Amino acid sequence: MTDLAFDEMHGFTGQEPRPSYRAIADWLHRTDHADLASQQQAAETIFRKLGITFAVYGDEDAEERIIPFDIVPRVLAAKEWGRLEEGLIQRVTAINAFLTDIYGKREILKAGILPPELILANPQFRLAMTTIRPPHDVWAHICGIDMVRTGPDEFFVLEDNARTPSGVSYMLENREAMQRLFPDLVADHRVRSVESYPDMLLAMMRSVAPKGSGDDPCCAILTPGQFNSAFYEHSFLADRIGVELVEGNDLQVVDRKLFMRTTEGMKRIDVLYRRVDDDFLDPLMFRPDSILGVPGLMDAYAAGNITIVNAPGTGIADDKAIYSYMPEIVRFYTGKDAILPNVHTYRCREADDLGYVLDHLSELVVKLVDGSGGYGMLVGPRSTKAEIEAFRAQIIATPQRYIAQPTLALSTCPTLVEEGIAPRHVDLRPFVLTGSKGTKIVPGGLTRVALQQGSLVVNSSQGGGTKDTWVLADDEPTVPTTPHGKEA
């Protein structure tokens, strides 16, 4: 990969703005830095009033933080999004087929596409799910697919999130902030809406209700509680889609059916969108010390009386070693090559790859196969010799726990910093919904931005921020001839 990063506004040349960014470039040229900074502060005030926060596990102060928000939007042309949408639907279709297969006939193992131990010895493989079929045969109802860009037409999938993907609340709140602060700018660009996501989410949940639930299935969201790092999002989504937000102690299984306590008595739940990891869902099936889940939940699930969104066992699709086989997985289940390629990945569990990784640690990004949030990783080019050697020892001790990838020159987007407008590296997490009536995606997603100069780590827990992601109805917006209003 080249060390020269592709800038999404100016391309590789750094000269004239690309067509989709011409109106944004004009807006930035016409607007004083002080005015932009003032609007940035206004956005932070909005977020603070709304309580849009996250927590970082392991912080000594344990203080909830407002996620940094950048007011310069990330823009995708209609044609660019069309290709991404097609590729995302293909990938998520393959993920659902893969999950159905590995918990069923395991045809992909019989074909020798994946080594059996990668599935059967995987900590995320749930043996209980080999005897349970999710209602409507949908496993990964909600997927967040992390993507990076390295050129005008070069998009790569960085990782899959098929267990409990987070961040959609920031996508929605970012758009609301931009519409409030820059209504004319949004309108001039003919930005496609993301506001339908809550309605799409509820429609998907209702579509996968167990048979016999009737025309008005009861849906709820299960949260670990207010001390969870994503609790804001749990409460946000429950409020937006109009369902109850429940904790484990609000629920009870009776006669293999799930009920929640209400002021009017016990009410049956048909669809449970869980934001609790598998291990904590049911102490009778998984961790016996869990107080976050519901005793008997998996029995109700096995009886076909409840739909769990996402299904237990989907976390195996998040494994980065399995990710390395996704091109083969897509081809096996769809009969076509993947529209969206993977980043080239070295599997440290394989001797040749391990040798290469150990010889090139200073050039690679090394990750735990079950890691997330930017933790448990080494960014070789930005690590000290001591850090590299310490990581080397960890890899040698348990090579099967690691994969490695080239250090990509991630694309940059214009970002407001103290010095003015500067390029910062970004990634993109679109959210893909799959129900009994098919797969749908709102046009956009969560753009995460590495706010520190030169940093490639975009995670909020590691100092990253977010941007609004604009998918244009047309490939090239018209540059307005009049100034935009500052605030609605």
Image: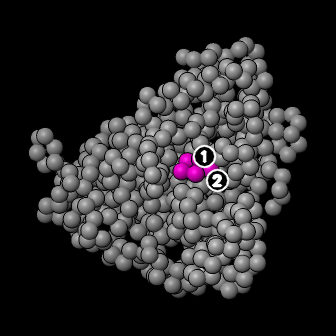
Tell me if 403 is positioned left or right of 278 in this view: right
Find the magenta span and give its range: 457-464
Question: Horizontal placement of 277 versus 452: left or right?
Answer: left
Amino acid carrying label 2: it is: Val
What residue did someone put label 1 on? 464
- 311 is higher (above) or lower (below) than 174: below
Q: Main secondary structure of the magenta part?
A: loop
Please provide percent x and percent y for residue 161. 52, 59
Q: Which of marks 1 and 2 is nearer the N terminus?
A: 2
| Residue that label 2 marks | 457
Q: Residue at the spot x=21%, y=54% of the render?
A: 249
CA distance separating discs 1 and 2: 7 Å
Query: Looking at the picture, does residue 235 appear above or below residue 59?
Result: above
Q: Is residue 78 visible?
A: no
Residue furthest left in the image: 265
Position of residue 384 in the picture relative to residue 43 (left or right)? right
Which quadrant would the N terminus be assigned to in this image? Answer: bottom right
Residue 175: image location, x then y, percent: 55, 32
Q: In the image shown, does 62 or 237 lie closer to the viewer? A: 62
Q: Quadrant of the C terminus?
A: top right
Residue drawn at point x = 43 percent, y = 31 percent: 50
Element carrying mark 2 = loop
The amino acid type, in three-letter code, at marker 1 is Gly
SS label for mark 1: loop
- Residue 46 visible, this angle: yes
Q: Is residue 69 above or below residue 436?
A: above
Q: Quadrant of residue 306?
A: bottom left
404 or 119: nearer the viewer: 404
